[in-house]
Image: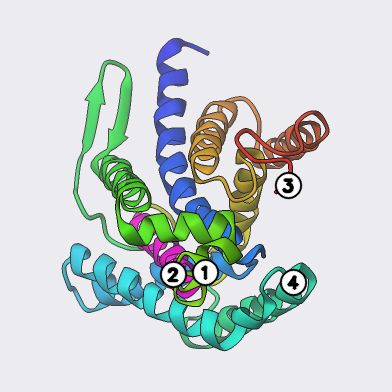
């Protein structure tokens, strides 16, 4: 295996890492605020791709418009889902687990009944391939990588520099203390949950032209996002970013040597070993 092939694999892994970051960030934000794992998170990633399929692939709207509509729709759905379903399950892992499985099933079956079970393709957004030496990458993948990096940077600045971002961090650290400081934990939790789902639908929209769009596409991704959140540290946003990049690069390079089934086994063994050696994750706390 020559160096060019490894670089090619790493470039593909970087694109996967960008997608993983967006989905895992949303899952980490939800966990940090509600202390629950939303296993239906991947279905909203799928919904983002489906919305893009109809708006961009069928109606011919500009890709940017489809992505924007998908993200806004994800945010609105996040507010509704948090208020109607998940609000009463704060820190109730078992209850939230059962609820999220039910939501997963309802969303997937509803989409399947309307969209169909067969995978559908989307046209390329930017035709062509960039070649540097022996490495080639499509402009579509470069677009996903660039847009993903910009979104992650904007979300990081939002969390670190804005009043709402500081409120999210305060509620995540200590809900009661944040309330005593005049922060409304209920509003912040609803906003954070909606932001998490918006990131998931945004990721689905971006990858629509790269992969087939079908109702089951969110299942595997939410498992990957869960692995990322665990390795990064439950509720740690920087940890989720680092773990997503590492997982994407690992899959891109390891995929040159092993098939998907072997890769899944290796990832499981690495996760199990990581939980034994450092159960709190890369940047997580002992409490989390």
Residue corresponding to mark 1: 179
Mark 1–mark 3 distance (CA, rounded to whole Å)? 21 Å
Query: Who comes first in sequence, dot 4 or dot 2?
Result: 4
Residue corresponding to mark 2: 182
Query: Who comes first in sequence, dot 4 or dot 1?
Result: 4
Q: Main secondary structure of the magenta part?
A: helix
Mark 2 residue element: loop
Residue 92: numbered disc: 4
Highlighted magenta segment, given as a residue range? 189-209
Vertical arrangement, residue 30 with respect to residue 224, above or below: below
Mark 4 residue element: loop
Task: Answer few, some or many: residues within 10 Å of disc 3's Cα (few below 14, many 20 plus, some between 14 and 19).
Answer: few
Instruction: Please state which of residues 64 and 258 is positioned toward the viewer in this rendering.
Output: 64
- Give the percent coordinates (x, y) of residue 53: 34, 71
Mark 3–mark 4 distance (CA, rounded to whole Å)? 16 Å
Q: Residue furthest front?
A: 180
Give yes or no for contact between labels 2 and 1 (Cβ–Cβ under 8 Å): yes
Q: Is residue 204 magenta?
A: yes
Mark 4–mark 1 distance (CA, rounded to whole Å)? 20 Å
Mark 3 residue element: loop
Which residue is at a point 79% across and 71% down the rendered structure image? 94
Residue corresponding to mark 3: 287
Which residue is at a point 72% across and 39% down the rendered structure image? 280
């Amino acid at each position: 295996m020559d160096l060019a092939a490894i670089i090619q694999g790493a470039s593909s892994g970087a694109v996967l890492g960008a997608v993983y970051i967006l989905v895992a960030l949303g899952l980490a934000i939800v966990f940090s605020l509600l202390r629950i794992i939303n296993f239906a998170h991947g279905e909203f990633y799928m919904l983002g791709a489906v919305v893009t399929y109809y708006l961009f692939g069928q109606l011919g709207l500009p890709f940017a418009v489809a992505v924007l509509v998908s993200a806004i729709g994800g945010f609105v759905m996040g507010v509704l889902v948090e208020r109607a379903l998940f609000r009463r399950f704060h820190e109730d892992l078992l209850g939230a687990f059962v609820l999220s499985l039910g939501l997963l099933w309802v969303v997937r079956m509803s989409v399947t009944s309307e969209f169909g079970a067969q995978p559908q393709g989307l046209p390329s957004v930017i035709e062509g391939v960039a070649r540097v030496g022996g490495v080639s990458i499509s402009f579509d993948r470069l677009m996903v990588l660039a847009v993903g990096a910009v979104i992650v940077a904007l979300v990081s600045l939002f969390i670190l520099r804005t009043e709402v971002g500081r409120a999210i961090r305060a509620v995540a650290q200590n809900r009661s203390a944040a309330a005593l400081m005049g922060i409304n934990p209920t509003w912040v939790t609803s906003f954070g949950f909606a932001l998490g789902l918006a990131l998931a639908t945004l990721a689905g929209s971006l990858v629509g032209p790269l992969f087939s769009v079908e109702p089951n596409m969110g299942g595997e991704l939410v498992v990957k996002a869960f692995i990322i959140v665990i390795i990064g540290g439950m509720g740690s946003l920087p940890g989720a970013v680092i773990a997503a990049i590492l997982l994407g690069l690992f899959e891109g390079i390891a995929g040159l040597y092993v098939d998907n089934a072997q890769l899944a086994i290796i990832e499981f063994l690495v996760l199990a070993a990581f939980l034994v050696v450092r159960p709190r994750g890369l940047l997580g706390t002992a409490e989390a």
